Image (spheres, rainbow, N blue to C red):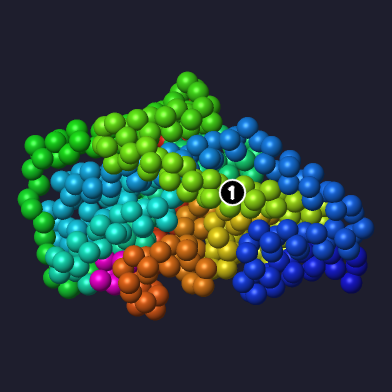
Amino acid sequence: MTQESIAILILLGGFFLMILLRFQIAYAVGISTAICLLYLGLPLATICQQMVKGISSFSLMAVPFFITMGVLMGTGGISEKLIALADSLVGWMRGGMAMVNIVASYFFGGISGSAAADTASLGSILIPMMVEQGYDDDFSTAVTITSSCEGLLVPPSHNMVIYATTAGGVSVGSLFLAGYIPGAVLALSLMIGSYIIAVKRNYPKGEKFRLINFFKQVGTSFWALAAVIIVVFGVVFGWFTATESAAIAVIYSLFVSVFIYKGLNWKGVWAVLDECVNTLSIVLILIATSAAFGYCLTYLHVPSMAASAITTLTDNHIIILLLINLILLVLGCIMDMAPIILIATPILLPLAVAAGVHPIQFGIMVVLNCGIGLLTPPVGAVLFIGSAVSKISIERIVKATLPFYICMIVTLLLITFIPEISMFLPNLFAK
């Protein structure tokens, strides 16, 4: 074996070995990078240089603001209002509470940008409510965790900012726009699956649709939904950058949570900021160590080698895209979302572009693949949160989630092979 081949084996083999041994992701990335650099005879100072370079990005300044905004709004008393809005819209259907769960996740995702926050916040309210109305507890939990992935697609999402930074040259505003229709397609797919199960199990209907009640709930929820308008339209129309819009959204979220909805007091605000710092420290150390890891991948020509390996197998664009999705799904089973974006994007993006996929469309594909990964054992974070909230075993939840996995895979294939789903809004506003 050549020195380069051994170095790649050390880098990737060491990383996956430590993942299997349950090392923290940041440690696995950092240690495998350090050992690889030592073997290559490169100075260890390279790690520090690349880590600092990885987080020295103006675009990444938006990440802590979006995280803070999401936590503020998520704990500021808006969950009940969004549930009431969703109930007024779709609660009349067979299996109405499942539909409410899915639609509420779409609204809430546009505020929190986090599947975990969605599951913890909405799940703690909706799962007991659904069970009380006659829904099976495992079905209720499965609907909650799968619909929470809408929050990853519906802007603002800090994971999209991480992808835009990693991909290079991708507009954050265009990515935000690109997420709306895929998020809606995912919601529709989950609603169809829920309806079929609801009819089969004869789950109850809600109250009849009343237009006056719907407008009343829109008025109540307006202050929460306006935060998304500030962020997305501000960036799209060039009024301010993603970072500036995120900072404005934090101030707005603080005002709404404390003074309008009154779901937070000033003591609670400090607790929120403490939670944000903890979350941000995890995200930034992942970005920093992944930057050093990515440097080694580039130095060893791994992206070009991976591209050559796949194109040697086939030159069929459909099969190449299916392979890319399969790789991302497998990675989702063993890694968390941010590391997948940071490590896989430099390797797989050139392949996807060569297969005719726009970088913005590929970003949506990556995010949804990672979202599915959050629901799959052994590392599925949202799966474990759902289990903790509902007090149901992982095995029962996974079994109940199987029909919804199919819905999500169908959505993923639609997004992969129908570019207009992701690109319609970015192209529309670009004209």
- Residue 240 in magenta stretch: no
Q: Which residues are magenta?
A: 137-142
Residue 263 sits in quarter: top left
Q: How many marks?
A: 1
Residue 76 sits in quarter: top left
Task: Name the outermost residue toward the front.
Answer: 267
**Badge 1 is on which residue?**
281
Determine the secondary structure under disc 1. Answer: helix
Q: Give the percent coordinates (x, y) of residue 131.
A: 20, 68
Q: Is residue 287 left or right of residue 67?
A: right
Residue 357 appearing in the image: no
- Residue 138 in magenta stretch: yes
Q: Give the percent coordinates (x, y) of residue 419.
A: 48, 46
Image quadrant holding the N terminus, namely bottom right
Q: Give the percent coordinates (x, y) of residue 221.
A: 24, 37
Residue 142 appearing in the image: yes
Q: Residue at x 63, y 32 (%)?
A: 58
* Above or below 425: residue 419: below
Rate crowding at label 1 as few (under 14), some (14 to 19) or many (20 or more) other CA atoms within 10 Å. Answer: few
The amino acid pointed to by label 1 is: Ser
Q: Give the percent coordinates (x, y) of residue 159.
A: 52, 47
* Above or below 190: residue 295: above
Q: Residue at x 65, y 39 (%)?
A: 168
Q: Residue at x 60, y 57 (%)?
A: 340
Pick the residue in front: 421 or 184. Answer: 184
Pick the residue in front: 173 or 86. Answer: 86
Q: Is residue 249 left or right of residue 64?
A: left
Q: Residue at x 63, y 62 (%)?
A: 25
What type of secondary structure mainly makes up the magenta span?
helix
Pick the residue in front: 234 or 177. Answer: 234
Q: Is residue 298 left or right of residue 342?
A: right
Q: Is residue 29 left or right of residue 76?
A: right
